[in-house]
Amino acid sequence: AQTVTQSQPEMSVQEAETVTLSCTYDTSESDYYLFWYKQPPSRQMILVIRQEAYKQQNATENRFSVNFQKAAKSFSLKISDSQLGDAAMYFCAYRSATSGGSNYKLTFGKGTLLTVNP
Amino acid sequence: KAGVTQTPRYLIKTRGQQVTLSCSPISGHRSVSWYQQTPGQGLQFLFEYFSETQRNKGNFPGRFSGRQFSNSRSEMNVSTLELGDSALYLCASSVLAGPPLHFGNGTRLTVT
């Protein structure tokens, strides 16, 4: 079974600074998706960025970028120019890219609570 | 385009009762999945439906069930509620068989 580990329960960053959230995962599959979701106090899970494992290029979405190291099974999220609105719980998640059976689910890490200080 | 809509937003039930939660996916999305979120266990997969068929179910007791209608709306039902069922229940939808990209605001269930 796949597992996702976020080793940092809490992180803090100064506004306008850069912060990196860590995520490692364990899988025997070669084709999969990785995601970072953000959950603010409003509770809605918001997709921040996604990465397909077959793509070597790291995904980027505006101020958010990832460092995907497939061999090391590492998937960190970098937030540049942090803003107060970035404060939230961040979840790393894994999903198999293979269709069928038990693959139609996301496996989440425990989350990292990010605080942004003004 | 309207997002994923979950109703109700809050529910308070008593042990032993049953509850039904509803999820309306984004228009055109045929896959709906459900997750339970608790402080202790984190986010856990409940089940996933595609075109009215349950394709996968998580490791939950039979008291947890669900279904999907022809218009892709989904309901989940929990019977004989226990205190441990208190949680935030999240629904997500996606196009065809893709991974869930859009979540609703969740239903906060409190069992007393």
Image (cartoon, rainbow, N blue to C red):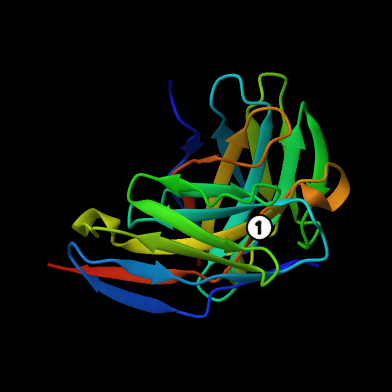
Residue B63: where, in percent of width, then height? 76, 56
Q: Is residue B48 left or right of residue B17?
A: right
Residue A36: where, in percent of width, then height? 50, 55
Q: Is residue A113 left or right of residue B81?
A: left
Residue denoted by label 1: A94
Q: Is residue B54 left or right of residue B39?
A: right
Q: Is residue B42 above or below residue A33?
A: below
Q: Residues within 10 Å of mark 1 (few under 14, many from 20)?
A: many
Between A54 and A77, the residue placed more toward the observer is A54
Looking at the picture, which amino acid does disc 1 mark? Answer: Tyr
Identify the residue shown where x is 60% and y is 59%: A93
Q: Is the N terminus of chain A in the top left, top right, bottom left or bottom right quadrant?
A: bottom right
What SS does tag 1 mark? strand
Identify the residue shown where x is 30% and y is 59%: A80
Residue B43: where, in percent of width, then height? 58, 62
Residue B79: where, in percent of width, then height? 70, 54
Q: How many marks?
A: 1
Q: Quadrant of residue B31?
A: top right
Identify the residue shown where x is 72% and y is 51%: A32
Residue B106 in sight from this viewpoint: no
Q: Is residue B23 above or below residue A57?
A: above
